[in-house]
Each structure stands twice: as structure tokens, then as C-alpha cells.
Amino acid sequence: MIDRLPTVKKLMRHLQQVPFLASKNMYRVTSYFLQLDDERIEQFCRALKEAKARVVLCQACFVWQEQNEQCSFCFDKSRDSSIICVVETWHELLVIERTEAFRGLYHVLGGVISPLEGVGPKDLKIEELVARVTSGVVELVFAMNQTPEGEATVAFIARKLHGKTVKVSCLAKGIPIGSNLEFVDRLTVGKALADRKLF
């Protein structure tokens, strides 16, 4: 059936490149876009292009921010700049923020070290994190997904921090091994953050 619709097939090939879009939902998403009227399609495309053009990474913590605006975390005077929470991606940062249990700064690595996927230390914001650890930073809280790759990344960074007088802690093991922070309820994440331990 799809082979008889080359235009639809082309659209689905592009949708397949979107991470986290399950294959079982591909036909539903395709149908959704095909049923949208022209005006809504234009609005969607404009919003996507505008976001791509105007949203950039903060050059200190690597959180998404509006271009030409100050980072809402780095420039928030009410936050404790002596403690930095290190996360894999923006998704985990949002989970931590929803707990309202952390009032320090953040650092988004952009992923974890994963040789099988071709991701090495130089592909992440590790050197930038090490550079941020100055005399004013007293603790790094690693809020990483509890996977072998996440733990290996923390161990690698801890070795890079050798000689720096900074406390390194991780979330408590209240979060199930192998789970993603994005799907853990806020009370569990808040408890794990409160009960963090030294690495």
C-alpha cells in the first residue's frame, strides 16, 4: 500500500529519523499531519523554523535559552552558584526542576560516554564542566541515569577532577537501576536528590 504512495513514503522516512518516535505510532503521526489544514501546517513549520533560529545553548551550562537573552539559571541571583547539578540532557534537568528540591546551577553534558554508539568524552561538555569548577564551586551533584554508561561517565569525570577541592556526589539509589529520570515520579527524584551520597 505505502509503495503506491511515494510522497507519503518520503514523509515517513523523515519521521523515522525523529528519535523517540515509536514505530507503532508512525502511521498515526503521518495521518495526523496529512489531515491538518494548510494553515495549521504552515503554523507548525513556522514554529519549528523559529525555534531552530532563535533557541540556542547557554555557553556556560548548555541549557536551551532564547537567543540574545540571559540564561534563566546562570543569571538567577536566587540560585546557589556553589553547587552544580550535572545532567545528561535537558529532559533530566526538567525532571530535577519539577521536584523544587534543587536551587543550585546546572550543567548539561549532552549525553554519556558510549563507545558502542560512537560517543566519546570529546563529544560531551566534560572539559567545559571541569573548567567551571573554580574555588567558588564546592559540590557537583551527578544526577545521571543509573546505567552502566552513566556510571562510567561519572567515574571518568571524577578522575578529571582529581586535585580539585570539590565534593562529588550522586543521586541516592532510590531510583531503579536502568530507569530514565524522565519517567520517574517527582517524589522519588526529590528523595534521591535529598539523599545523595559521595561518589
Image (cartoon, grey):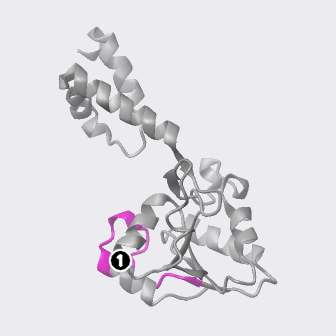
Q: Position of residue 23 (x, y in %)?
A: 31, 38
Q: Quadrant of residue 10?
A: top left
Magenta span of residues: 169-187
> Position of 64 compared to 130: left or right?
left
Q: Secondary structure at mark 1?
A: helix
Q: Where the N terminus falls, by quadrant?
A: top left
The answer, for residue 173, to whether it is visible in the render is no
Residue positioned 34% across, 25% down in the render: 12
Q: Is residue 185 magenta?
A: yes
Q: Position of residue 58 (x, y in %)?
A: 59, 56
Residue placed most toward the observer, 43 or 95: 43
Residue positioned 34% across, 42% down in the render: 21
> Position of 66 compared to 25: left or right?
right
Residue beneath disc 1? 99
Relative to 130, does residue 37 appear above or below in the rendering? above
The amino acid type found where label 1 is placed reads: Thr
